Image (cartoon, grey):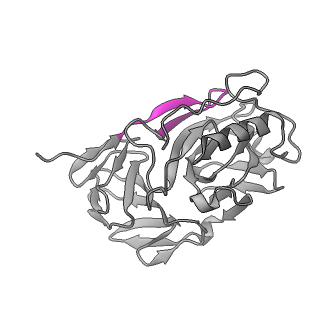
């Protein structure tokens, strides 16, 4: 009996102020794809004067955040002193390592403007040997991302290597992240670019090897295999993947680690405000579930 691909459905999450995201990873059916342990799709969301969808300063360990916009803008600031406006088509890659704090806010130039924000934020778990690396920040402009025409499909190689092009974004493990603009009626052969691969239908329905994949759904490809994509109407599809994780990871709040005790330590450090300060920021978000941020985080969830 032939079965279709494993399909992951989104779970809506409210990040505060009515700012909602669709979360695909981690899920009950699949905890990671390649190094990616977290996948949020936000928007298209209308931003108007007076709306407060800013993401206040918060900490991370053991991961790299990967931010990519289809529309809109946001201002990144972190405890290293980095300040960067993120625009559509660019990649923001922030390596948390042993610990970093950052915020993502509406750029000052857009405070009185109306516009649309739409994009993705992913987390890539760092390899075991690099979990405690020094934190770092890297921004790659849209103009530096390879853009190709492959089989009649506009392909942007955001991270990794595909179709003879290599992204300048530096990674610590084999990672694949592509943005495809699939026209109606085109048959696109996606090769086996990594051992683990998945596609995500951003703004319309697509089919994978003839099986339907609805908008806002992620579909896993068989391990070590590619697949054929097609659509009746033009659709944007992203591809993620890479080598499998080199061991289980625990995820609690904004912390990722191979060790439970490291997450407890990070929680205590954040509660004591020992993880650094974003210059110009004064707000503090306590650990979830405790008004003063001193409760040990729950690490009883199943590891990735």
Q: Is residue 216 above or below residue 188?
A: above
Magenta span covers which residues? 8-24
Image quadrant where one finds the N terminus: top left
- The picture quadrant where one finds residue 104 is top right
On the question of residue 160 being in view, the answer is yes
Tell me where residue 251 appears, x and y as whole percent.
Answer: 57, 40
Q: Looking at the picture, tell me which residue is in the foreground, 108 or 141.
A: 141
Question: x, y (%) of residue 5?
Answer: 27, 47
Q: Nearer the viewer, residue 299 or 220?
A: 299
State the image coordinates of residue 130 (x, y, percent, origin top left): 63, 61
Q: Say above or below: 187 vs 55.
A: below
In the image, residue 216 above or below residue 63:
above
The reply to whether the magenta stretch includes residue 14 is yes
Where is residue 230 drawn, in percent x and y? Answer: 28, 56
Q: Nearer the viewer, residue 24 or 289?
A: 289
Q: Is residue 32 left or right of residue 98?
A: left
Residue 115 appears in the figure? no
Is 210 placed left or right of 235 in the picture?
A: left
> Residue at the location (89% across, 44% down)?
280
């Amino acid at each position: 009996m032939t079965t279709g691909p494993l399909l992951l459905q989104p779970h809506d999450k409210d990040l505060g102020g009515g700012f909602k995201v669709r979360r695909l990873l981690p899920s009950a059916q699949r905890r990671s794809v390649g190094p990616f342990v977290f996948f949020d799709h936000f928007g298209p969301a209308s931003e108007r004067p007076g709306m407060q969808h800013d993401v206040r300063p918060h900490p991370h360990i053991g991961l790299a955040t990967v931010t990519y916009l289809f529309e809109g803008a946001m201002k990144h600031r972190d405890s290293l002193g980095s300040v960067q406006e993120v625009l559509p088509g660019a990649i923001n890659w922030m390596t948390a390592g042993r610990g970093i704090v950052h915020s993502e806010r509406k750029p000052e130039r857009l405070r009185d403007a109306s516009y649309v924000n739409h994009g993705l934020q992913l987390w890539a778990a760092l390899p075991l040997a690099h979990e405690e690396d020094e934190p770092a920040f890297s921004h790659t402009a849209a103009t530096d991302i390879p853009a190709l025409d492959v089989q009649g499909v506009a392909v942007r190689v955001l991270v990794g290597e595909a179709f003879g092009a290599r992204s300048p974004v530096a990674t610590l493990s084999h990672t694949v992240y592509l943005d495809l603009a699939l026209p109606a009626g085109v048959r696109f052969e996606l090769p086996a670019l990594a051992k683990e691969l998945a596609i995500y239908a951003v703004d319309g329905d697509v089919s994978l090897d003839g099986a339907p994949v609805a908008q806002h759904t992620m579909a896993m490809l068989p391990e070590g295999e590619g697949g054929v994509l097609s659509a009746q109407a033009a659709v944007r599809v992203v591809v993620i993947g890479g080598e499998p994780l080199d061991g289980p990871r625990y995820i609690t709040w904004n912390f990722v680690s191979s060790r439970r005790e490291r997450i407890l330590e990070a929680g205590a450090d954040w509660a004591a405000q020992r993880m650094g300060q974003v210059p110009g920021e004064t707000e503090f978000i306590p650990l979830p579930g405790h008004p003063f941020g001193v409760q040990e985080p729950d690490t009883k969830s199943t590891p990735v």
